[in-house]
Image: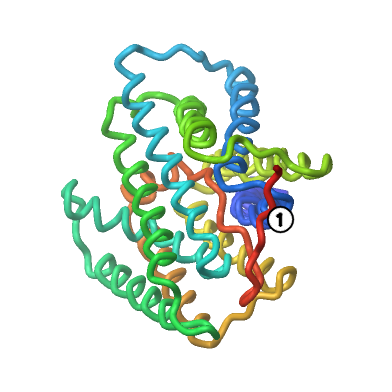
Amino acid sequence: MNNKVKGYFLGAISAATYGMNPLFTLPLYNDGMDADSVLFFRYLFAIPILAIMLKWRRRSFKIERRQILPLFIMGILFAASSLTLYMSYNYMDAGIASTLLFVYPVMVAAIMTLFFKEKLTLQTVLCIVMALVGIGLLYEGGEEGTLSLAGTMLVLGSALAYTIYIVGINRVGLENMATIKVTFYVLLFGWGLFAFRSLFFGDGILLPNTWYMWGNIISLALFPTAISLICTTTAIQEIGSTPTAILGVLEPATAIFFGITVFGEVLTPRDCIGLACIIASVCLVVAGGKNITYTLIRFRKMFPKLPIRRRGIKIVRSRRN
């Protein structure tokens, strides 16, 4: 296998493993855990994995005092994006929600054009229009009528929060810090948010009722976090950031695949057209701007996609007494 083929293969693996989140998250919900608890353990298990990766790459854990506040703010923003996404679970299917979340590169292009003097091109305008058309088609789609306005706004809010994170993190004094080191501290501070919410505003930290569900928690930290991050880094080295970013289209595609084949989700022709518009707009915006592509790929997202639920079937989340 030559280096180029290896790069494309690893880029595909990176995106596909990131799209595996529904396989591991939904069983945890059915086993009695809530959003804060799942995120609490996902972040908690991911932190030591990243710590090992830091030591393996001979990176120091030391940070400067002036970097603490920016890291804290980015961590809270990152965690809030995850939490907002999880709050939309009961409003739409995973494939549609994952694709709605995938509009964040278009949001990045818009923000960089409006606030950071990124050149506005016809291609960028076309991508924004295509994304809006796709969202409009999805909003009117579905067998049960329109998607919930609350659910749609929550997913778009999650995408916007992550957009602000990846645009802002290069402009708060962290641009010279290694990506994996930034991610380690962002997850560490973000984990604190879920601990605080669970202990003071929720029902406490819920544990799985069955021992083998711990495998799902470990898988959430391993596959869409560690493996995806390692494969992304290697793919960028082999084929560059633009092809790697474009291969990210496999993230929502994987969620759609699992939704249809494993959990019985149904996509209407209108849904398919809407999904295609969003995916095409993202690929075009990534391919059209080097600065945008670099911004997108340097801090790759590590929060999970929506768990999949069957259309028309409400998931009942049991709780311990």
Which color mode does the image show?
A: rainbow
Q: Image point 40% across, 76% down: which residue?
A: 134
The answer to whether 95 appears left or right of 104 in the picture is right
The answer to whether 224 appears left or right of 77 in the picture is right
- Amino acid carrying label 1: it is Asn
The answer to whether 110 appears left or right of 223 in the picture is left
| Residue 276 visible (yes or no) | yes
Q: Nearer the viewer, residue 282 or 317?
A: 317
Where disc 1 sits, the SS reads helix
Q: Is residue 236 above or below residue 123?
A: above
Q: Image point 33% across, 12% down: which residue?
A: 65
The answer to whether 111 appears left or right of 82 in the picture is left
How many numbered marks appear? 1
Q: Position of residue 222 (x, y in %)?
A: 68, 39
Badge 1: few (under 14), some or many (20 or more) residues near its Cα, within 10 Å?
some
The image quadrant that residue 133 belongs to is bottom left
Q: Position of residue 190 (x, y in %)?
A: 47, 33
Q: Nearer the viewer, residue 47 or 217?
A: 217
Name the residue beneath numbered marker 1: 30
Q: Farthest residue toward the front?
A: 321
The image quadrant that residue 215 belongs to is top right
The image quadrant where one finds the C terminus is: top right
Q: Nearer the viewer, residue 182 or 259?
A: 259
Q: Position of residue 248 (x, y in %)?
A: 53, 57
| Residue 187 visible (yes or no) | no
Q: Image point 37% across, 34% down: which residue?
A: 74
Q: Image point 32% across, 69% down: which residue?
A: 127
Q: Is residue 307 above or below residue 147?
A: above
Q: Position of residue 232 (x, y in %)?
A: 56, 44
